[in-house]
Image (cartoon, rainbow, N blue to C red):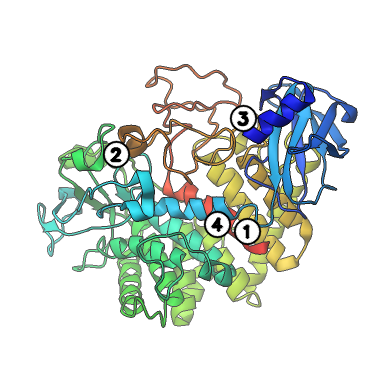
Amino acid sequence: MKKLLTTTAMLGLAFTMQAQVRLNQVGLSPQQEKVATVEGVVKASQVKILDAKTGLQVVKPHVLRVVTSPFSKKKRTVIDFSSLKTEGDYLVIAGKHLQPFCIRQQALHEVSRGALKAFYLVRSGMPIEAQYAGEWARPVGHADTQVKVHSSAASPGRPEGTMLSSPGGWYDAGDYNKYVVNSSYSIGLMLCVYEQCKDYFAGLNVNIPESGNRTADLLDELMYNLRWLLTMQDPWDGGVYHKLTTPKFEDFILPTDCHQQRYVVAKSTAATLDFAAVMAQAARIMQGNADYPEFPEQAQRAALAAYHWAELNPQVLYRQEEMNKQHQPAVTTGAYGDFFLGDEWYWAATELYLLTGDGKFMRDAEQRQPPMFRAPSWASVAPLGAYEWLTSKPETPLGQTCRKQLLEYCDSLLKAVPTSSFQSPSGNSAHDFGWGCLGGSFCSTGVALLFAHKLTNDQRYLVAAGENADYVLGRNALGFCFVMGFGTKSPMHPHHRISAADSVEQPFPGLLVGGPNPGQQDKADIKTTYRSSLPDESYLDVVDSYASNEIAINWNAELVALMAWLDALE
């Protein structure tokens, strides 16, 4: 910042940071497309790209288009300066507004590393140590060695009130509970991308307690949650509890100050199938691993038992309100209810086929082949199965169908870019915004584009994936880099209990917030009024805003998947 102030003083100008210029605040690689969006209508001659040290203009940008926002009707100018390929620190200046940026090799490396490191910071059941976490260190909370079986989860082998041990895992979101469906999805997506970038992840050291062993840090981190997941299966029948939770959300206090009794609650078919899928996937990937030699066999047994339970209980849905009419204590934490299970069956059958080679599972997957592709989410996991068919068995009818569906989907995304306000395939429709949209509509969609690039080597898909990353990192209607701790303007007040309750001013770095949400489901519960109801501007950086400013492991998994793969391709 001192260099920036020196440069602007040398130019004899006063500038307003960020008010008008939107671009990727983390970094651009020398060879990638370089685009900024300027608020208002400007000519190319009114925009300058300067060397931050010398103040000299380094390239003349050209105007791609002037576009009217489909939401606000604001006019914006999209400028391109892709001809600038030299590493360094630069400024975009438009009138009296500026935005610094840098060009670096592996420009996304630190945000990729930070996004993965964030999972260590949200670990449950162990002390988070200063040598790994710095100022975000904290004592152990939620040991979860005395968890009760809720009456909704009772079985002959584990009656109501049975105490069990279920330690470890990650806190799911802004709260302190642990949910099987979301954990399974988060692990499953990151394992899909791990298989595409094994060499990259082998060299990605994020400084966690397991760093330095013979296993990639990504896999070590996933194993911390996988071992917790194993404890969520009832050994009596193979069914899997939907979640481990307190009856109600904790206040905004530190883990060590939480004293509510915790329960495993209600088995569900969705949780059991997601568990079966991710255990089969992890068993296959971890085969022969020297650091976790017993895990693959344990995971395979658990996956087969879970699938068998699901076959006997094919439609056990988690309906929290109905459950509370019959069981006590009432549970009011996140439901993760899912009332269509075809995608869970498809993913589980796919992973079990790839693990065992048993044709029964291929037939089960064929029966549940979805009619089209859409980017995955915790409630729509069929694409995780599609990614496996695309890359592991592309010659099969399932693989061919998945390829066709994926490319149709990605081609539809490409069509939106030439008229986009922010040169991105996502964010051009109101449907792209809502709860967790930055993970689901931007990062997850970007990963789909990278799979399309892998299949075809068509650079258009790679460029488009990078455009979605640029949106998340600053080239958006609000000028936020939505990953905490990165960029020149990032969220400071997330809906995250630890960040709100600890004594550290900065929130956990590397966590992605949910993002603009015109649904504003929290507006009755917050003291601050949303400044806008526009789809791409309906966001508040306040602790109370759980609808727009919460964090969650699934969104961070999507962030890791996109940023790491883009970084690997560097």
**Helix, strand or loop at disc 1?**
helix
Of circles 1 and 3, the one toward us is 1
**Helix, strand or loop at disc 4?**
helix
Report if the CB atoms under discs 2 and 3 are less than 8 Å apart.
no
Q: Please give the residue where the numbered disc 4 appears in the rendered image.
A: 561
| Figure quadrant of residue 213 | bottom left
Front residue of 452 and 308: 452
Q: CA distance from mark 4 to mark 2?
A: 27 Å
Q: Please give the residue where the numbered disc 2 appears in the rendered image.
A: 333
Which numbered disc, 4 or 2, marks the residue that appears first in the sequence? Answer: 2
| Amino acid type shown at disc 2 | Thr
How many numbered marks are there? Answer: 4
Q: Label 3: how many residues lie within 10 Å, few (<14), some (14-19) or many (20+)? A: many
Of circles 4 and 1, the one toward us is 1
Residue 145 place in picture, x, y as percent: 16, 56
Which numbered disc, 1 or 3, marks the residue that appears first in the sequence? Answer: 3
Which numbered disc, 1 or 2, marks the residue that appears first in the sequence? Answer: 2
For residue 567, which numbered disc appears in the image?
Answer: 1
Q: Please give the residue where the numbered disc 3 appears in the rendered image.
A: 536
**Quarter placement of the N terminus:** top right
